């Protein structure tokens, strides 16, 4: 039997010299799930002009100094505003209805107001040049929303071209969803990453589960051979496809470090995939090297124990990769 290749060695030979793919300009409305190639920043002060935070009359606060019920101050040209309206030039506050009275057919102020009161100042939500998201971050729903509200129309993404050719439609659909969350763009020709079924029945990779998975380079293309069992399919996605997509996008795996509620046992010589479930501020680990559909449905994160490990004791700190947002 041929000795199994450590996971780190497989990744090193496949990803050596691999740089991120070229960036492309994508409308913000179509960028959800993509990996940013350049930082996203506020193009202008947002809001660009002061806005009313409440209903009332736009005023210059210093003009109302000393105003009271016994000393009302007439408002020569009162401009009523609603919440969200831009303030007219010269106004720096919004006087609410309780501070107004009608006297001799005109509005008067019967209370003072401080400069900036009832107002969202220019740049309150974000100053021009302030960061929205860093390069390598995922364009999540809320980042897309912030970018749109800030007035951005396009962004620069790295979207590796991916092709998945698997005989099992369930595995095909699962992996396509997995790669979509990593910023992949599916193509029929010239992919950066091709996933195809593994034809090698002999174990090759020191990974549990997933010992018949393999990642290698064929010319300019990365090729991931995917096992036929679902648990090994998932292991191949986490251990091989995720690092490949990180290299192609320039992103990094996100981690959450928490203590273990119980020990994990694993054998020497193999990298073991472990599913993790959040419990308060800790991880509840599943069995090392085991993935079931029920366990995956309940899991929040996963980790790969290195081959030199013999497991971890209860209370040990473990960095888990979140399943919902693994890169960013």
Image: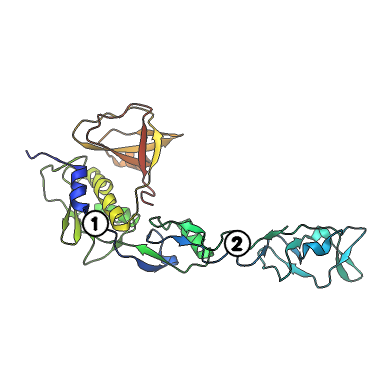
Asked where in the image residue 86 lies, by quadrant, the reply is bottom right
Q: Quadrant of the N terminus?
A: top left
Crowding at mark 1 (Cα within 10 Å: few <14, some 14-19, many 20+)? some
Residue 208 percent coordinates (x, y): 21, 38
The residue carrying mark 1 is 18
Above or below 308: residue 211: below
Give the CA separation, mark 2 to mark 1.
41 Å
Residue 307 percent coordinates (x, y): 22, 35
Q: Which mark is residue 123?
A: 2
Closer to the N terminus: mark 2 or mark 1?
1
Q: Residue at x 18, y 47 (%)?
A: 10
Residue 114 percent coordinates (x, y): 76, 57
238 left or right, relative to 214: right
Q: Which mark is residue 80?
A: none
Above or below 227: residue 277: above
Crowding at mark 2 (Cα within 10 Å: few <14, some 14-19, many 20+)? some
Q: Residue at x 40, y 57 (%)?
A: 135
Above or below 108: residue 171: above
Of helix, strand and loop, which one carries label 2?
loop
- Residue 217 seen anywhere in this rendered image of the structure: yes
38 left or right, relative to 12: right
Above or below 17: residue 85: below
Asked where in the image residue 285 lies, by quadrant, the reply is top left
* Model colouring: rainbow
Of helix, strand and loop, which one carries label 1?
loop
- Residue 228 seen anywhere in this rendered image of the structure: no
Q: Residue at x 36, y 51 (%)?
A: 327
């Amino acid at each position: 039997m041929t000795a199994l290749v450590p996971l780190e060695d497989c990744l090193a030979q496949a990803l050596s010299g691999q740089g991120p793919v070229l960036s492309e300009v994508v409308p913000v409305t179509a960028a959800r799930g993509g990996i940013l190639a350049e930082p996203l920043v506020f193009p202008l002060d947002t809001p660009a002009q002061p806005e009313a935070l409440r209903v009332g009359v736009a005023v210059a606060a210093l003009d109302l100094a000393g105003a009271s019920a016994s000393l009302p101050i007439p408002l020569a040209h009162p401009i009523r505003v609603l919440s969200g309206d831009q303030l007219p030039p010269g106004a720096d506050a919004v006087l609410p209805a309780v501070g107004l009275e009608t006297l001799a057919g005109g509005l008067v102020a019967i209370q003072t107001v401080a400069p900036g009161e009832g107002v969202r100042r220019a740049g309150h939500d974000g100053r021009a040049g302030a960061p929205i998201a860093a390069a390598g971050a995922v364009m999540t729903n809320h980042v897309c929303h912030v970018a749109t509200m800030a007035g951005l129309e396009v962004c620069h993404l790295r979207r590796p071209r991916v092709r998945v050719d698997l005989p099992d439609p369930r595995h095909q659909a699962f992996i396509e969803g997995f790669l979509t969350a990593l910023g992949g763009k599916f193509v029929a020709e010239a992919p950066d990453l091709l996933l195809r079924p593994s034809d090698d029945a002999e174990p090759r990779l020191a990974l549990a589960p997933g010992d018949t998975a393999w990642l290698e380079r064929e010319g300019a293309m990365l090729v991931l051979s995917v096992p036929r069992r679902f648990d090994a399919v998932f292991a191949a996605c986490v251990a091989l496809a995720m690092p490949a997509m990180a290299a192609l996008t320039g992103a990094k795996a996100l981690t959450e470090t928490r203590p273990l509620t119980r020990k994990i046992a694993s054998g020497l010589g193999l990298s073991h995939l472990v599913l993790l479930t959040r419990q308060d501020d800790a991880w509840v680990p599943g069995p090392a090297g085991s993935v079931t559909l029920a366990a995956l449905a309940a899991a929040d994160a996963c980790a790969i124990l290195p081959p030199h490990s013999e497991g971890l004791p209860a209370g040990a700190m473990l960095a888990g990769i979140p399943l919902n947002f693994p890169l960013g």
